Amino acid sequence: VLGGATVGKAELIREIYLFSRNTGPSLSPFNAWVLSKSLETLAVRVEKHCQNALIIAEFLENHKQVEKVKYPFLRSHPQYEIARKQMKLGGNVVAFEINGGLNAGEKFLNRIKLLSLSANLGDTRTIVTHPASTTHSKLSEEDRLETGITDGLVRISVGLEHSDDIINDLNQALN
């Protein structure tokens, strides 16, 4: 189910309104109900995602196969103090640099057993992606580096599974 709101300048909203009126992109009653029900537990789910993400980030920061971890609520993050002032939670996306570059990233993905492999970033399940070999593989290395995508970058959208299960799968894939 996907729903949303359109926000913008009046002239853009008018164009979108006319398109929407003519094409009818609206939620079905059932999908509206599903969305409404899911909003009831959104805060609890987001909190669990973020708690798990911090645990995963701390685990990865101490792993010998990991060069660097990017997560705003890690004390080692350059904007840690700012993040703590501005945010209640650190989010559910953890990025890290795996030692060994492109080859190591591909091997890591191939060893994942429990977690999902996808370019998507939002789910109740933990999703892992290696952008250099998936979403950004058609770009040159130079173009990837310009956007911050190194050969060893791995992104994890941390889900609601027990953090021990996530760690066990990451650990076996890294080793």
Image: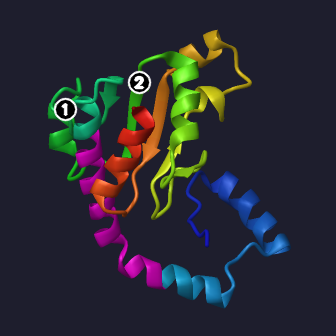
Relative placement, left or right, of 19 versus 87 is right
* Camera-nearest residue between 30 and 164: 164
Q: Is residue 34 above or below residue 133?
A: below
Q: Check disc 2 and give the amino acid type.
A: Glu
Tell which circle, 1 or 2, labels the residue nearer the N-terminal end: 1
- Residue for point 48% across, 26% down: 153
User: How far is disc 1 from disc 2 in space, using C-alphas?
Assistant: 18 Å
Mark 1 secondary-structure assignment: helix
* Residue lying at the far right of the rendered structure: 22
* Camera-nearest residue between 30 and 59: 59
Q: Check disc 1 and give the amino acid type.
A: Tyr
Badge number at residue 80: 1
Mark 2 secondary-structure assignment: strand
The stretch in magenta equals 37-57
Relative placement, left or right, of 174 versus 130 is left
Indicate the colouring scheme. rainbow
Q: Quadrant of the C terminus?
A: top left
Q: Is residue 139 magenta?
A: no
Please say whether residue 92 is visible from this viewpoint.
Answer: no
Please say whether residue 33 is visible from this viewpoint.
Answer: yes
Q: Which residue is mark 2?
A: 97
| Residues packed near mark 1 inside 10 Å, few (<14), some (14 to 19) or many (20 plus) | some
Marks 1 and 2 in Cβ contact (< 8 Å)? no
- Residue for point 80% across, 64% down: 19
